[in-house]
Image: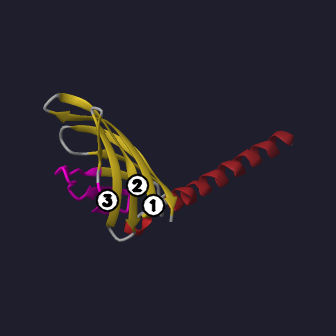
Amino acid sequence: MGAKRIGLRAMAIGVLANVGLPVVEQAHSEEKCSLATLKGTYLFAHGGYVLTDQGMVPKAVTGSNIFFGDGKFSDQETISTNGMITTEPPGSGTYTVNRDCTGILSPSPTKSGNSVKLQMFISPNGLDIVDIEIDPGSVLSGTQHRVAR
């Protein structure tokens, strides 16, 4: 009789586990992103390489973005390209966010004429962004983390 009870309990646990899986999957699929997912001040750090007339050289960028939740943002950054430091004046740009929490960040061209596009992967709560520059001649990726709402 004991083996029969254990078998029934195991079967019940299996049924409950299988019934619970669609609920978990459904809850995950309901996590949709929008422009409003990105709102607040984010600190960022990016590193990699960029193609110049000297060949591929190291590049690092740090700074902050302020996302307004409507597809627009402002930024401020410091750039090191092969050890040459450039501090950009505050800038701005636009961004898109897809329902699957991916998007594109498009800063306005800098004073030096540089224009970049970043592919973003956004946490559903908007707290973190992992991104990569998608322009030819650049291997640059990094993270952004919201520090204020």
Label 1 CA crowd tier, 10 Å (few <14, some 14–19, many 20+): many
Q: Which of marks 1 and 3 is nearer the N terminus?
A: 1
Task: Find residue 145 and report its horizontal and vertical position in percent.
Answer: 47, 52
Inspect the image, locate mark 2, and give the three-letter code of the amino acid beneath it.
Ser
x and y percentages locating residue 42 in the rendered image = 44, 56
The residue at the far bottom in this view is 70
Q: In this view, does 64 lie above or below 55?
A: below
Q: Which residue is identified by label 3?
A: 90
Q: Mark 1 points at which residue?
A: 41
Q: Which of 130 and 26 is in front in this view?
A: 130
- Viewer-side residue, 31 vs 149: 149
- Residue 17, above or below 55: below
- Is residue 13 found left or right of 50 in the rendered image? right
> Is residue 66 in the magenta section?
no
What residue is shown at x 26% (from left), y 57% (from top)? 107
Mark 2 — residue? 64
Q: What residue type is labelled 3?
A: Pro
Q: How crowded is mark 2: few (under 14 residues within 10 Å), some or many (20 or more)?
A: many
The label on residue 95 is none
Write the residue at 32% across / 67% down.
72
Precedes in sequence: disc 3 or disc 2: 2
Displayed quadrant of residue 7: top right
Q: Give the range drawn in magenta.
A: 89-118
